[in-house]
Image (spheres, grey):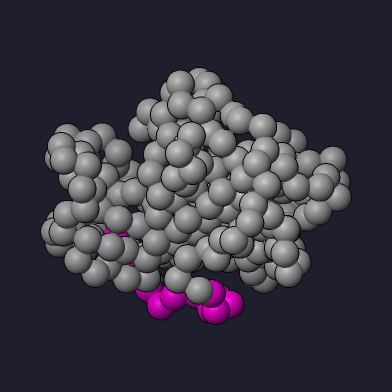
Amino acid sequence: MATHGNEHDNIFELTTQVRFSEVDHRKVMTIPAIINMFQDCVTFQGDAVGLSHDVLKAEMRAWVLTHWHIVIDRAPRLHEQVALGTFASRFRGMLANRNFYLRDEAGELLVRANSSWGFIDLATGTLTRAEARFTEPYGTHEALAMPPESRSVRVPPTLAACDPIRVIRHHIDINEHVNNSQYVLMALDLIPHEAHPSSIRIDYRRPAVLGDTIYPQMACEEGRYVVALCDAAGVPYATVELA
């Protein structure tokens, strides 16, 4: 894995290879593997600019993901060499926008994503203003072109209840919450095996933790699947749209 970050354009990029553990039966990269790559990439950038998870935690601060919009133009294949990159496109008060991408060896975009983040005070669990020392090391870069989207995932009026999911240890990440990609795995397990979404949108509402029970609800309409991953009262932890 080689890093090719450029301090002048504020893009953090590395080259890597698609691994056996990241592909499905078609030998193409899975959606959760793409999300995990993106999460790894932003973590590496944080380390590179001096704002690692440990540094932020010592300050009782954290960036929390609130929304993904991922477009797969072509899923990378097993053993393919890819460039993986990320950059912040905007910081505004308590919020930030960040793009991610995968490119092939010819430089063509394979996957592109926009994401929204909130800056959290870990002591109170509430949003707080991101001071310049937490944003300036990243800089910003012009946002990627993305298809237009609504502000949040539109949930159909009627959804069908699915089997509950108990949160167990393999769902949990470094923050002691269900990992962002795990919600997508839960949603993908509910849609037909032959469905291969190329557009993924996710609204993250609040974190599920070890021992929680998630109650999925699903609907299919207008060429898209919507999965609401809720608590027993029907309040969503996350809402996933696959189209």
Q: Which residue is more in the foreground, 197 or 214?
A: 214
Quadrant of the rendered image containing residue 24: top right
Horizontal and vertical percent position of residue 12: 43, 58
Please tell me whether residue 212 is drawn above or below residue 102 in the rendered image.
Answer: above
Quadrant of the rendered image containing residue 23: top right
Q: Look at 67% across and 38% down and name the residue there.
A: 162
Total residue callouts: 0
What stretch of residues is rendered in magenta? 138-149
Please tell me whether residue 42 is drawn above or below residue 107 in the rendered image.
Answer: above
> Does residue 174 appear left or right of residue 19 in this picture?
left
Horizontal and vertical percent position of residue 80: 74, 51
Horizontal and vertical percent position of residue 179: 48, 37
Where the N terminus falls, by quadrant?
A: top right
Where the C terminus falls, by quadrant?
A: bottom right
Q: Judge whether residue 139 is colored magenta.
A: yes
> Does residue 157 appear left or right of residue 45 in this picture?
right
Asked whether the viewer can see residue 104, the reply is: no
> Does residue 33 appear left or right of residue 196 in this picture?
left
Q: Main secondary structure of the magenta part?
A: loop
Asked whether the viewer can see residue 73, the reply is: yes
Q: Look at 17% across and 54% down and name the residue there.
A: 128
Please tell me whether residue 225 is drawn above or below residue 152 in the rendered image.
Answer: above
Horizontal and vertical percent position of residue 103: 63, 63
Q: Judge whether residue 177 is colored magenta.
A: no
Q: Look at 16% across and 40% down and name the residue there.
A: 124
Q: Look at 55% across and 24% down and name the residue there.
A: 166
Please tell me whether residue 144 is drawn above or below residue 129 in the rendered image.
Answer: below
Q: Which residue is more in the foreground, 231 or 196?
A: 231
